[in-house]
Image (tube, rainbow, N blue to C red):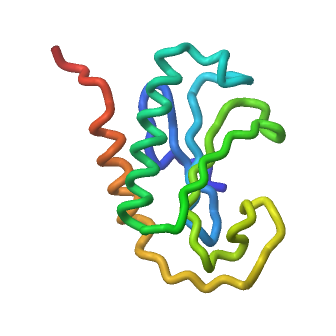
């Protein structure tokens, strides 16, 4: 898992989970054990960020499904996994943490171009710092 943020602002940062599928993880910069402990404004912003990431994945990769998950069992702080899933990925329809279903040989577009699209979408959501 890459610890170097692909994108960040004052409240959140985004990292890549190394995988055979496109898989990102969104973290708030402050640690919240539970979703309900996050300030309401941050929960609303989170929804906007997750939506933008999902839209970028759908537009760029055209997956069968997008999975968004938040567990916090091993890392007991809120964070969200966003994954593009394909019918022929190694685990589909099982979760990526589940039992492998097949060997996978996906031919996917360039990840760096995808991240550039994600950054553009997230940048458009950043609050203006100018009056």
Q: Is residue 29 above or below residue 41?
A: below
In the picture, the quarter occupied by the C terminus is top left
Q: Nearer the viewer, residue 33 or 59?
A: 59
Q: Position of residue 125 (x, y in %)?
A: 32, 34
Q: Determine whether, in the image, residue 69 is placed left or right of residue 98.
A: left
Q: Residue at x 53, y 68 (%)?
A: 64
In the current view of this chain or complex, which residue is farthest to the left?
A: 131
Near-viewer residue (50 or 113) = 50
Tell me the residue at 62%/79% (across/down).
88
Q: Is residue 107 shown above or below 59? A: below
Image coords of residue 44 (percent x, y):
46, 24
**Residue 93 at what x, y percent from top left?**
69, 68
Q: How many tags in the picture?
A: 0
Residue under the point 37% across and 65% down: 60
In the picture, measured across the screen, residue 109 lies left or right of residue 21, that is left
Q: Residue at x 54, y 57 (%)?
A: 66
Is residue 16 visible in the rendered image? The answer is no
Res. 47 in view: yes
Seen in the picture, residue 95 relative to 127 is either above or below; the reply is below
Quarter occupied by the N terminus = bottom right
Quadrant position of residue 51: top left
The image position of residue 108, as x and y in percent, is 47, 77
Please name whichever residue, 128 or 102, is drawn nearer the observer in this view of the structure.
102
Q: Quadrant of residue 57?
A: bottom left
Is 84 or 118 nearer to us in this picture? 84
Query: In the displayed structure, does residue 61 sit left or right of residue 33?
Result: left
């Amino acid at each position: 898992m890459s610890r170097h943020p692909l994108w960040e602002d004052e409240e959140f940062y985004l990292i890549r989970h190394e995988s055979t599928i496109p898989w990102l993880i969104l973290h708030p910069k402050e640690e919240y054990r539970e979703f309900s402990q996050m300030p309401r404004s941050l929960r609303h912003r989170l929804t906007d960020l997750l939506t933008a990431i999902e839209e970028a994945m759908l537009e760029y990769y055209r997956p069968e499904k997008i999975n968004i998950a938040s567990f916090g069992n091993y890392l007991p702080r809120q964070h969200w996994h966003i994954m593009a899933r394909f019918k022929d990925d190694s685990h589909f329809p099982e979760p990526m943490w589940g039992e492998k279903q097949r060997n996978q040989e996906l031919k996917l577009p360039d990840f760096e171009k995808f991240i550039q699209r994600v950054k553009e979408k997230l940048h458009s959501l950043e609050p203006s710092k100018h009056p």
